[in-house]
Amino acid sequence: TRILQCGGFVQFGRVCGILAVSRALGDYEFKFNGNRFIANRELMVSNVADVRQINLTDSSNFLLMACDGLWDVVENEEATQFVRDFLSYTPDVGSSPEATKRALNNCCQKLAEFAVDRGSTDNVSVMLLFFHDVADVVAGFDKPVGAVVSPPASQVLSPRLTGPSRGIPFGSSMLDGGLHTSSGTSGTRRPSFGSVSSLHGRGRSIW
């Protein structure tokens, strides 16, 4: 409604057939009228965030964030299953902070590459944050069906992800890669990791 009231239109699910989001910082071409910026209430693309609160529980394992370059070609469920399969195949997850960070970086990179292989022509960024100890969470994942050997992580692409699909994220956020801490179920401080990967560079899915 806001877009139409501002003189715009929606085509192919995009603002004026161009922009995939209706709320964003930047994208100034949608915020000019002649030589001046127009008031926020008149913006086709609003800079006011649409905020949603989600209550986390002990069963909340990780947060997967990505731009539309991923979600245009990968369903939410596929992306979360990719993370589960990839890390289940990685033998040294949790053996050291360095190994864990490397595994998460590889997972983000491979998921971004998978989106490009599937046909994404947009820039692709993927961010991953675990809420609990990574090794404990991964140990609770079901092993992929038919898994007998563990190939190197650099060679893994989830066998479950085939064929064309489209996905729509339900929000967006940013996370700097690095080591963070979170409270474990025992009340002690335990390591939790975040990782970010960007491919040719800028959603969200929670599991």
Image (cartoon, helix red, strand yellow):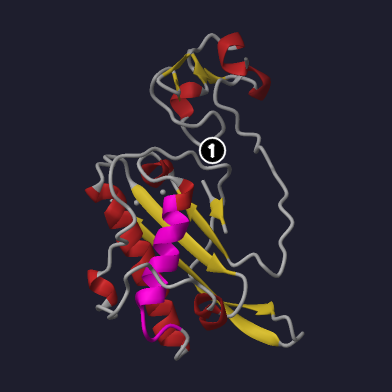
Residue name at image x 66 percent, y 67 percent: 59
Instruction: Check disc 1 and report the residue beneath it.
Output: 25
Say if the magenta span includes residue 85: yes
Q: Please give the name of the residue rendered at 49% of the width and 36% of the height, measured from the top-left corner.
A: 26
Expressed as whole percent of the image width and height from the top left, the position of residue 119 reads 24, 42
Number of labelled discs? 1
Q: Residue 16: horizontal and vertical position, in percent?
A: 43, 17
| The N terminus lies in quadrant | top right
Classify residue 153 as left or right of residue 3: left
Part of the protein shown in magenta: 78-93
Q: Main secondary structure of the magenta part?
A: helix
- Establish if 81 lies above or below 203: below
Residue 115 seen in render: yes
Q: Is residue 175 left or right of residue 104?
A: right
Q: Is residue 142 above or below residue 135?
A: above
Residue 180 screen position, x and y as percent: 59, 76
Q: Quadrant of residue 83?
A: bottom left
Residue 196 at least partly seen? no
Q: Residues within 10 Å of mark 1 (few under 14, many from 20)?
A: few
Image-quadrant location for residue 90: bottom left
Give the quadrant of the C terminus.
bottom right
Q: Quadrant of residue 24?
A: top right
Identify the secondary structure beneath mark 1: loop
From the top left corner, tell me how far across and down residue 117 is, in percent.
23, 49
Residue at the image position 75 percent from the left and 86 percent from the top: 186
What's the residue type where badge 1 is placed?
Answer: Leu
- Residue 110 falls within the magenta-colored stretch: no
Please identify the residue farthest to the bottom as the structure is shown.
Answer: 95
